[in-house]
Image: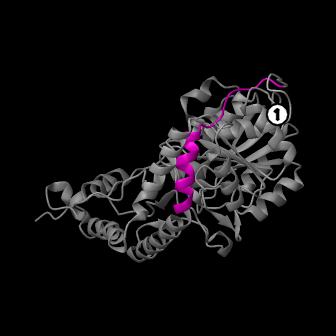
Amino acid sequence: MAKLALFGNAPVRKVPFPQWPQWTEQEERNILDVLRSGQWFRYLGDKVKQFEEKFAAYHDAMYGLAVTSGTAALEASLSALGVGPGDEVLVPSYTFVASATSIITNGATPVFVDIDLKTANIDLASAAVAITERTKAMMIVHFGGCPCDMDQVLQFAKSHNLKVIEDAAHAHGGKWDGKGLGSFGDIAGFSFQNSKNITAGEGGIVLTSSEELMNHVFSYHSYGQRRDYPWYSHHVVSRNLRMTEWQGAILLAQLERMPEQTELRLKNARKLDAALREIGVFTVMGSDDPRAAQRAYHLYQFRYAPGIAGVSRERFLEALRAEGIPCSAGYPVPLHKQPLFAGVKPPAGLQSYQDLELPNTATLCDENIWLVQSLLLGADADTQDIIDAIAKIVENADELR
């Protein structure tokens, strides 16, 4: 007799996981403060400024400037580094589209490189092969919140005279060797889009410890203006990427809970790691390096490898959802295989981005499984439900064959 929920039986999980976004009375109080102050523009109020200072300090950077999105943060960062037409920027192909399109909107060329299968982060051996005399910078992505090996990244960048941009859209509260992610490279961009570990629905921030770079970012995000110059004084072609006081108010409250939530995600992720290793048909992802222990876990990822014999990943995911566990396969194809890149001129030596083969990226697209960060914000019993659902499917795999 069938036991799996996919065939009409009772699921393991019958109630929703913790909702996201989450809020408390602190968000409400902060928003009411802004409303009643009448100072809704960021340079009239103080909520965005407070958030910038606290977020930068938490991540061990000297300066922070809030902007409209994580994409805007990356665009401003690249502009500050002088990346433009004729330049190439190394970027992993297992990442969100904005990592690459931010390079294109600055007039430069993205050069896609492969990833390490264990971490889903940039593979420096692949990056080394892709360097040319036009390579100006590398954009590393702390994918899913797993820290890149920043010691190796910085050594690599120094040896090849490259600027380093940290795409830290998944990395809120993460650390490498005790130091905040977003403080290692020349400059970094975070996102506060709705799914992120702290959120105002949308938003982003640029972090750097260079006053020169921050001054450029300031001009770029506010009509080419400069601090300590007259208001009607514009110095570079730029945009309006200013965050509102409403968003700053929400993010201030979100930031207060971030340390506690980061620890809770870590605790539940470790429980999942141990259980999946014991079940034995999956590959746990993430660095074993103790310097990477403080992970942000925007995503909990594991590979469907070797997988359940005779059961596809898609069939497994279908069964897991039926048991009440939200899950997905993540990115279906490497980023450079997306249709938009058919119309983008590739770097010299490549006829088309579609011709580029990055085997580890392709493998992860075929094998990866994502659990979103809010699933890790429950109690021990909630994490146990995830484990029990996976174990139930493995034990009753004959029903799926």
Q: Is residue 296 left or right of residue 60?
A: left
Q: Secondary structure at mark 1?
A: loop
Q: Is residue 370 above or below residue 339?
A: below
Q: Residue at x 33, y 68 (%)?
A: 382
Q: Is residue 151 left or right of residue 72?
A: right
Q: Quadrant of residue 342?
A: top right
Task: Name the residue nearer the viewer: 186 or 126.
Answer: 186
Q: Is residue 54 above or below residue 331?
A: below
| Residue behind mark 1 | 87
Q: Quadrant of the N terminus?
A: bottom left
Q: Quadrant of residue 181?
A: bottom right
The stretch drawn in magenta includes residue 243: yes
Q: Is residue 292 above or below residue 84?
A: below
| Amino acid type shown at disc 1 | Asp
Q: Is residue 373 left or right of residue 204?
A: left
Measured as percent of width and height from the top left, residue 156 is found at: 82, 57
Measured as percent of width and height from the top left, residue 263 is found at: 52, 70
Tell me if mark 1 has few (under 14), some (14-19) or many (20+) residues whose alpha carbon lies within 10 angstroms of its own. many
Q: Residue at x 52, y 43 (%)?
A: 193
Q: Residue at x 16, y 55 (%)?
A: 7
Measured as percent of width and height from the top left, residue 135 is found at: 83, 40
Residue range highlighted in magenta: 236-257
